[in-house]
Structure formats: structure tokens, C-alpha cells
Image: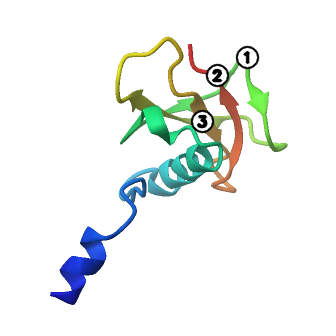
């Protein structure tokens, strides 16, 4: 009974990601929360590995030659979509983002 209360009272904006690229997805979601961008984002993430990226707003330097690009679907249609978050595959940290269009 206590377990049900604790899980039911959890912050609805939290997301837990498991499986392949789970840590990268979690890092991207945490970054969206820090930037207060989760209002429009669904908690489902898709992942692509990118070698060349353009129009990136870098938030941290990265020596990587490729990045994990994590994108979240928009909860509702809007003029500006949720940014694509770039995660360094070795550090598992956000290194940049591509603004939503």
C-alpha cells in the first residue's frame, strides 16, 4: 500500500528510460527539464546516431566524432517543436542541441 502511494505521488514530469541508449535518453530528458522544455515533450524518445550535425547550440565541448541524437515527440502541435538533444556516447552527457522548428 505504501509503495502504491509513493509511486502515485511521484512527479508526473519524471521519466525513466531503460534498454538500448537508456542513459542517453535519460540525460536528454534531464537536460529538457533543466531548460524547462518538457512542457511540450512526450516521454517517448527516439534515437539516431549522427556523424555530421549542423545548426547546433553547443553546451559542452566534445571530442567525439559522432553523437547520439535524442528527439522527443511534441505533446501537442505547435509552431516550435522540442529540440533534438545531442549526447556524447562515451560521457553520456548532453553536449548540444538543435533548436526545434
User: Residue 76, image x and y in percent?
Assistant: 35, 23
Quadrant where the C terminus is found in the figure: top right
Residue 87 figure quarter = top right
Cα separation between marks 3 and 2: 9 Å
Question: Residue 62, how many percent across, how many down?
Answer: 80, 43
Q: CA distance from mark 3 to mark 1?
A: 12 Å
- Tell me if mark 1 has few (under 14), some (14-19) or many (20+) residues whose alpha carbon lies within 10 angstroms of its own: few
Disc 3 element: strand
Q: On the image, numbered disc 1 is attached to which residue?
A: 55
Tag 2, which secondary structure?
Answer: loop
Observer-nearest of 4 and 90: 4
- For image coordinates 42% across by 53% down, the residue present is 13
- Residue occupied by mark 2: 99
User: Along the polypeptide, which appears first: circle 3 or circle 2?
Assistant: 3
Q: Is residue 26 above or below residue 75?
A: below
Q: Is residue 47 visible?
A: no
- Establish if 53 lies above or below 47: above
Q: Secondary structure at mark 1?
A: loop
Q: Is residue 56 left or right of residue 75?
A: right
Residue position marked by numbered label 3 in the rendering: 85
Q: Earlier in the sequence, mark 2 or mark 1?
A: 1
**4 left or right, relative to 44:** left
Left or right? Give the position of 59 relative to 20.
right
Amino acid at each position: 500500500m505504501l509503495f502504491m502511494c509513493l509511486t502515485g505521488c511521484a512527479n508526473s514530469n519524471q521519466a525513466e528510460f531503460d534498454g538500448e541508449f537508456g542513459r542517453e535518453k535519460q540525460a536528454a530528458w534531464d537536460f529538457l527539464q533543466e531548460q524547462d522544455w518538457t512542457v511540450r515533450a512526450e516521454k517517448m524518445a527516439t534515437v539516431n546516431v549522427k556523424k555530421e550535425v549542423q545548426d547546433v547550440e553547443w553546451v559542452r565541448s566534445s571530442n567525439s566524432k559522432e553523437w547520439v541524437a535524442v528527439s522527443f515527440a511534441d505533446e501537442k502541435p505547435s509552431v516550435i517543436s522540442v529540440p533534438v538533444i545531442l549526447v556524447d556516447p562515451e560521457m553520456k552527457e548532453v553536449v548540444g542541441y538543435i533548436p526545434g522548428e
